[in-house]
Amino acid sequence: MRRGIWYGMLVGALAAALVGFAQGARAGAGADPMPLTEPPIRWVPPATFDVNLPGRGFPQAPGCENTIIYDPAPCRGNVDEGGNGKYEDVLHGTFNHHPGWYFLGDYVITQWTNHSRDENGPGQRELCRVGKWVGDKNSPDAEIDWGDPAVTTVEVAPPPILIRRRTWSVSPDTIYPYITGGLTLRGDTLYLVAYLDCIGGYTTSEANRNPMGPLPAAEYSDSLNRAAGFRYDMWFNLGMQFVQRWRLQDDRLVPDSPLYQITPQVKRVEVTPGRSKVVAPLVPPYTNMIPIAQAPADIRRAFTPRPAPPQSTAQAEHPQFKDGAYWLAADGKDGLAHFTEYRRPDGKYVSIRDNLLNAGHYYASIREPNGYYPPAMETNLYGGASPSAGTLPDGRIYLLCNSQRRLDMFMMLSRDGIVFDRTWLLVHSDREFDGGIYKGGGPQYYHANIIGPNMWIFYSIGKVQMGVTKVLLATLE
């Protein structure tokens, strides 16, 4: 489970987030957050709400259309299971997650990570699919033509090593990397920006999941061991950030430049003081990338790395929190994970979080435009992982949530951003999948965009399929 903002969209999205934060925080950034005395939101459940019912008893949204746009076949390429270490083609690999998308002219460009079977497994790659608007995209009747999946689905970042299964224990001496990243849009130009990452072990604290250096031996394990406190998998950034320009041609994505390497690769990782692991050797095209210094001037200007002040990953991605406070809950259950935020009509900001140490209800916190978030409080808002928030054209605040087992996608609405008194079911899915690490459930990890009278939501289903839901907003009374 990859937290917060996905690094593959960081070049564009993080820059925008930092600019937005700076605009709202210039007057008083650094002001201490005020402790909460009560949750900043309240949910009024419908009378039909029942956690034991499919769809939790929520009324079905009337103007809702659901489409599966990627339904993969099993991959037999894992080298540790007798395979050749390669994907059969772009339609194979039953782990699919980390969704995102862009709208470019007449096209809709989706993207996600893909592995043979497991989340963040060795040799994970990046896929995209291109759809085309049918008719006026600002019409209530707008549709997307996804074409032939074998044609419109493209591998934009190949696997960095021969693919293999991920297991609940990492190798004691070898790091097996995968690709993290995706497309970013600069003006009307698409760039792939990605880097190497890996699952390097397990730790005892959410705050250690992106370590800045070796951890104390007491806080690190090669194996998942919840009884001993080692419940959090860790991500080690292995560098080797790279960029490639892409373009649309004949309704599909094609590369428009070579791969340019921006930063050097980390070839050895010190996991605890004095204990290191070697990174498995890479495969082409990553063994013969061109240095960024030899890229065209526009790519050099946009992607040459600049020195950054030393800080934690969480602080860099979420400047609305004081350093070290991103994980903190008011009740001391400091397992806050995925983050979403909206601005209330009165100008204050509210964050909605899930808590890995206390599942079942979302946590929330509130800040002034020029302040930091205090530790979040548990609310009565029912839900599971990774909510998504925003504002409808009529000014109402929406929350996209899912149920505890992630079987249901539902929307909650509020006039004031405080009381959420309308709830609609969008998707229910309880089909069985093929197992695999950190997979299962139904619709999850939503990316919503409002175009004209419709909301379009892109998401994974069980971290296997990829889906799109169209919601006609006028039907949500």
Image (cartoon, rainbow, N blue to C red):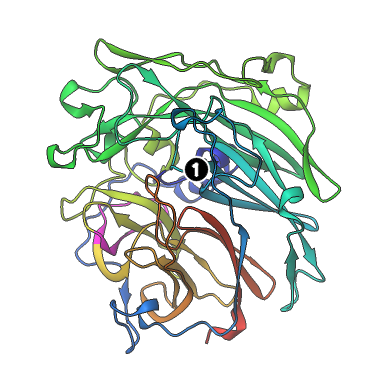
SS under mark 1: loop
| Whole-percent x, y for residue 124 in the image | 52, 35
Number of labelled discs? 1
| Whole-percent x, y for residue 431 in the image | 44, 66
One can see residue 344 in this view:
no
The region drawn magenta spans: 359-377
Please, what is the three-letter code of the amino acid marked with disc 1?
Answer: Trp
Tell me which residue sits at (25%, 52%) in the image: 375
The residue sitting at the front extreme is 82
Label 1 neighbourhood size at 10 Å, few (<14), some (14-19), many (20+)? Answer: some
Where does label 1 land, which residue?
6
For residue 37, above or below residue 331: below
Say left or right for 368 vs 134.
Answer: left
Say left or right for 55 vs 22.
Answer: left
| Whole-percent x, y for residue 234 in the image | 33, 33
Between 331 and 218, which is closer to the camera in this rendering? 218
One can see residue 360 in this view:
yes
